[in-house]
Amino acid sequence: MCAPVLGAVAPAFAGLSGLGQTLMIASLGLSVAQGVMGYQAQKAQFKAQSQQIAATEAAAAQSMHSDLAMLTLRQRQEAQSAEKKVFENRKQALAAKGQALASSGSVQGLSVSQLLNDFTAQEAQFADSVAHNKELRLEQLGAERKRVHARAVSRVAGLAPAVGPSLGNTALGIAGSTLGTASTFLGNPNFRRGI
Protein backbone atom coordinates (compact mmCIF):
# COMPACT_ATOMS: atom_id res chain seq x y z
CA MET A 1 0.00 0.00 0.00
CA CYS A 2 2.74 2.43 0.98
CA ALA A 3 5.12 1.48 -1.87
CA PRO A 4 2.91 2.93 -4.67
CA VAL A 5 2.38 6.11 -2.68
CA LEU A 6 6.06 6.52 -1.95
CA GLY A 7 6.89 5.62 -5.58
CA ALA A 8 4.65 8.46 -6.74
CA VAL A 9 6.06 10.96 -4.25
CA ALA A 10 9.79 10.10 -4.54
CA PRO A 11 10.52 11.74 -7.95
CA ALA A 12 8.83 14.94 -6.88
CA PHE A 13 10.70 14.82 -3.58
CA ALA A 14 13.99 15.15 -5.45
CA GLY A 15 12.78 18.43 -6.91
CA LEU A 16 12.41 20.05 -3.48
CA SER A 17 14.99 22.28 -1.86
CA GLY A 18 16.90 21.06 1.21
CA LEU A 19 14.52 22.93 3.53
CA GLY A 20 11.53 21.63 1.57
CA GLN A 21 12.81 18.06 1.83
CA THR A 22 13.41 18.42 5.57
CA LEU A 23 10.00 19.90 6.22
CA MET A 24 8.29 17.28 4.04
CA ILE A 25 10.11 14.43 5.83
CA ALA A 26 9.16 15.92 9.21
CA SER A 27 5.54 16.31 8.11
CA LEU A 28 5.42 12.76 6.75
CA GLY A 29 6.95 11.47 10.00
CA LEU A 30 4.29 13.29 11.99
CA SER A 31 1.56 11.85 9.76
CA VAL A 32 2.88 8.31 10.24
CA ALA A 33 3.25 8.84 14.01
CA GLN A 34 -0.28 10.22 14.19
CA GLY A 35 -1.60 7.20 12.26
CA VAL A 36 0.24 4.74 14.52
CA MET A 37 -0.93 6.53 17.66
CA GLY A 38 -4.50 6.54 16.37
CA TYR A 39 -4.25 2.81 15.72
CA GLN A 40 -2.86 2.19 19.22
CA ALA A 41 -5.67 4.27 20.75
CA GLN A 42 -8.27 2.26 18.80
CA LYS A 43 -6.59 -0.94 19.96
CA ALA A 44 -6.71 0.19 23.61
CA GLN A 45 -10.35 1.25 23.22
CA PHE A 46 -11.19 -2.15 21.70
CA LYS A 47 -9.53 -3.92 24.63
CA ALA A 48 -11.37 -1.78 27.20
CA GLN A 49 -14.70 -2.26 25.42
CA SER A 50 -14.13 -6.03 25.21
CA GLN A 51 -13.37 -6.13 28.94
CA GLN A 52 -16.52 -4.13 29.70
CA ILE A 53 -18.63 -6.51 27.62
CA ALA A 54 -17.09 -9.51 29.37
CA ALA A 55 -17.73 -7.92 32.78
CA THR A 56 -21.36 -7.17 31.86
CA GLU A 57 -21.86 -10.74 30.62
CA ALA A 58 -20.35 -12.11 33.83
CA ALA A 59 -22.54 -9.84 35.97
CA ALA A 60 -25.66 -10.88 34.04
CA ALA A 61 -24.78 -14.55 34.46
CA GLN A 62 -24.06 -14.10 38.18
CA SER A 63 -27.31 -12.22 38.69
CA MET A 64 -29.24 -14.90 36.81
CA HIS A 65 -27.65 -17.72 38.84
CA SER A 66 -28.38 -15.88 42.08
CA ASP A 67 -32.01 -15.28 41.11
CA LEU A 68 -32.42 -18.89 40.00
CA ALA A 69 -30.96 -20.12 43.30
CA MET A 70 -33.50 -17.99 45.19
CA LEU A 71 -36.32 -19.41 43.07
CA THR A 72 -35.10 -22.95 43.73
CA LEU A 73 -35.14 -22.19 47.45
CA ARG A 74 -38.68 -20.82 47.18
CA GLN A 75 -39.76 -23.98 45.33
CA ARG A 76 -38.37 -26.16 48.12
CA GLN A 77 -40.05 -24.00 50.73
CA GLU A 78 -43.38 -24.25 48.90
CA ALA A 79 -43.08 -28.03 48.72
CA GLN A 80 -42.15 -28.30 52.39
CA SER A 81 -44.98 -25.99 53.42
CA ALA A 82 -47.49 -28.07 51.45
CA GLU A 83 -46.19 -31.29 52.98
CA LYS A 84 -46.45 -29.78 56.47
CA LYS A 85 -50.04 -28.68 55.86
CA VAL A 86 -51.03 -32.15 54.66
CA PHE A 87 -49.26 -33.76 57.61
CA GLU A 88 -50.96 -31.45 60.13
CA ASN A 89 -54.34 -32.07 58.51
CA ARG A 90 -53.74 -35.82 58.61
CA LYS A 91 -52.93 -35.58 62.34
CA GLN A 92 -56.13 -33.63 62.97
CA ALA A 93 -58.16 -36.11 60.95
CA LEU A 94 -56.69 -39.05 62.86
CA ALA A 95 -57.39 -37.29 66.15
CA ALA A 96 -60.99 -36.61 65.06
CA LYS A 97 -61.42 -40.25 64.01
CA GLY A 98 -59.98 -41.42 67.31
CA GLN A 99 -62.28 -39.11 69.24
CA ALA A 100 -65.28 -40.30 67.25
CA LEU A 101 -64.37 -43.91 67.89
CA ALA A 102 -63.80 -43.27 71.58
CA SER A 103 -67.09 -41.38 71.87
CA SER A 104 -69.02 -44.16 70.21
CA GLY A 105 -67.64 -46.66 72.70
CA SER A 106 -68.67 -50.11 71.72
CA VAL A 107 -71.39 -48.82 69.41
CA GLN A 108 -70.84 -49.68 65.83
CA GLY A 109 -73.00 -49.11 62.90
CA LEU A 110 -73.74 -47.06 59.87
CA SER A 111 -73.54 -43.65 61.53
CA VAL A 112 -70.04 -44.28 62.95
CA SER A 113 -68.82 -45.62 59.60
CA GLN A 114 -70.29 -42.61 57.80
CA LEU A 115 -68.62 -40.26 60.25
CA LEU A 116 -65.23 -41.96 59.76
CA ASN A 117 -65.71 -41.94 55.98
CA ASP A 118 -66.56 -38.24 56.15
CA PHE A 119 -63.32 -37.52 58.04
CA THR A 120 -61.35 -39.52 55.46
CA ALA A 121 -63.05 -37.66 52.58
CA GLN A 122 -62.34 -34.26 54.15
CA GLU A 123 -58.72 -35.23 54.67
CA ALA A 124 -58.39 -36.30 51.02
CA GLN A 125 -60.08 -33.11 49.75
CA PHE A 126 -57.75 -30.97 51.85
CA ALA A 127 -54.70 -32.88 50.59
CA ASP A 128 -55.89 -32.47 46.98
CA SER A 129 -56.46 -28.75 47.52
CA VAL A 130 -52.99 -28.28 49.02
CA ALA A 131 -51.40 -30.30 46.20
CA HIS A 132 -53.24 -28.23 43.58
CA ASN A 133 -52.19 -24.94 45.20
CA LYS A 134 -48.59 -26.19 45.43
CA GLU A 135 -48.60 -27.04 41.71
CA LEU A 136 -49.93 -23.58 40.84
CA ARG A 137 -47.23 -21.89 42.93
CA LEU A 138 -44.54 -24.08 41.38
CA GLU A 139 -45.81 -23.23 37.89
CA GLN A 140 -45.65 -19.55 38.82
CA LEU A 141 -42.08 -19.99 40.04
CA GLY A 142 -41.24 -21.85 36.81
CA ALA A 143 -42.53 -18.89 34.81
CA GLU A 144 -40.43 -16.58 36.98
CA ARG A 145 -37.37 -18.74 36.19
CA LYS A 146 -38.02 -18.19 32.49
CA ARG A 147 -38.32 -14.41 33.04
CA VAL A 148 -35.01 -14.38 34.95
CA HIS A 149 -33.30 -16.20 32.08
CA ALA A 150 -34.87 -13.94 29.45
CA ARG A 151 -33.82 -10.84 31.41
CA ALA A 152 -30.19 -12.06 31.51
CA VAL A 153 -30.21 -12.88 27.78
CA SER A 154 -31.74 -9.48 26.98
CA ARG A 155 -29.17 -7.70 29.11
CA VAL A 156 -26.30 -9.32 27.20
CA ALA A 157 -27.96 -9.15 23.77
CA GLY A 158 -28.34 -5.38 24.12
CA LEU A 159 -24.59 -4.87 24.20
CA ALA A 160 -22.94 -3.48 21.09
CA PRO A 161 -20.09 -5.71 19.91
CA ALA A 162 -16.56 -4.42 20.35
CA VAL A 163 -15.06 -3.16 17.10
CA GLY A 164 -11.33 -3.64 16.69
CA PRO A 165 -8.92 -1.29 15.00
CA SER A 166 -8.30 -1.58 11.27
CA LEU A 167 -4.78 -1.66 9.89
CA GLY A 168 -6.26 -1.03 6.45
CA ASN A 169 -7.94 2.18 7.58
CA THR A 170 -4.76 3.28 9.34
CA ALA A 171 -2.68 2.60 6.23
CA LEU A 172 -5.17 4.49 4.05
CA GLY A 173 -5.06 7.42 6.47
CA ILE A 174 -1.27 7.50 6.38
CA ALA A 175 -1.23 7.20 2.57
CA GLY A 176 -3.78 10.00 2.23
CA SER A 177 -1.83 12.18 4.60
CA THR A 178 1.39 11.44 2.70
CA LEU A 179 -0.21 12.46 -0.61
CA GLY A 180 -1.68 15.58 0.99
CA THR A 181 1.69 16.56 2.43
CA ALA A 182 3.43 15.94 -0.90
CA SER A 183 0.80 18.00 -2.71
CA THR A 184 1.23 20.84 -0.24
CA PHE A 185 5.01 20.94 -0.55
CA LEU A 186 5.12 20.34 -4.29
CA GLY A 187 2.49 22.98 -4.93
CA ASN A 188 4.39 25.62 -2.99
CA PRO A 189 7.07 27.31 -5.14
CA ASN A 190 9.00 28.41 -2.02
CA PHE A 191 10.14 24.80 -1.39
CA ARG A 192 11.40 23.95 -4.89
CA ARG A 193 15.10 23.62 -5.72
CA GLY A 194 16.96 26.66 -6.72
CA ILE A 195 15.19 29.09 -4.46
Image (cartoon, rainbow, N blue to C red):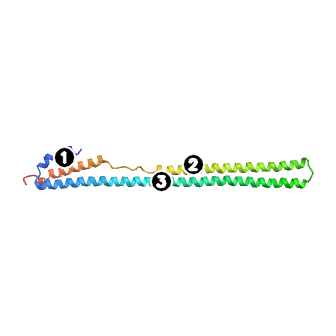
Dot 1 and dot 2 residues touching (CB under 8 Å): no
- Residue 142: % across, % down: 61, 49
Measuring 73% from the left and 50% from the top, which residue is drawn there? 129
Badge nearest the viewer, 3 or 2: 3
Check if mark 3's residue and mark 2's residue have beta carbons within 8 Å.
no
Quadrant housing residue 7? top left
Q: Nearer the viewer, mark 3 or mark 1?
A: 3
Residue at mark 3 to residue at mark 1: CA–CA distance: 48 Å
Residue type marked 3: Ala
Q: Position of residue 193 (x, y in %)?
A: 9, 52
Q: Earlier in the sequence, mark 3 or mark 2?
A: 3
- Which mark is drawn over residue 114? none
Q: Residue furthest left?
A: 194
- Residue 58 image label: 3
Are the residues flagged by discs 3 and 1 in contact, CB closer than 8 Å? no
Question: Along the line of sight, which residue is nearer the eye, 160 or 3?
Answer: 3
Tell me the residue at 62%/51% (across/down): 141
Which residue is rendered at x = 65% and y = 55% of the image? 77
Q: Which residue matches tag 2? A: 146
Element marked by disc 1: helix
How many other residues sit within 10 Å of disc 1, few (<14), some (14-19) or many (≥20)?
A: some
Dot placed on the residue nearer the N-terminal end, 1 or 2: 1
**Quadrant of the frame with the N terminus:** top left
How far apart, in angstroms, are the residues tagged by discs 1 and 2?
A: 61 Å
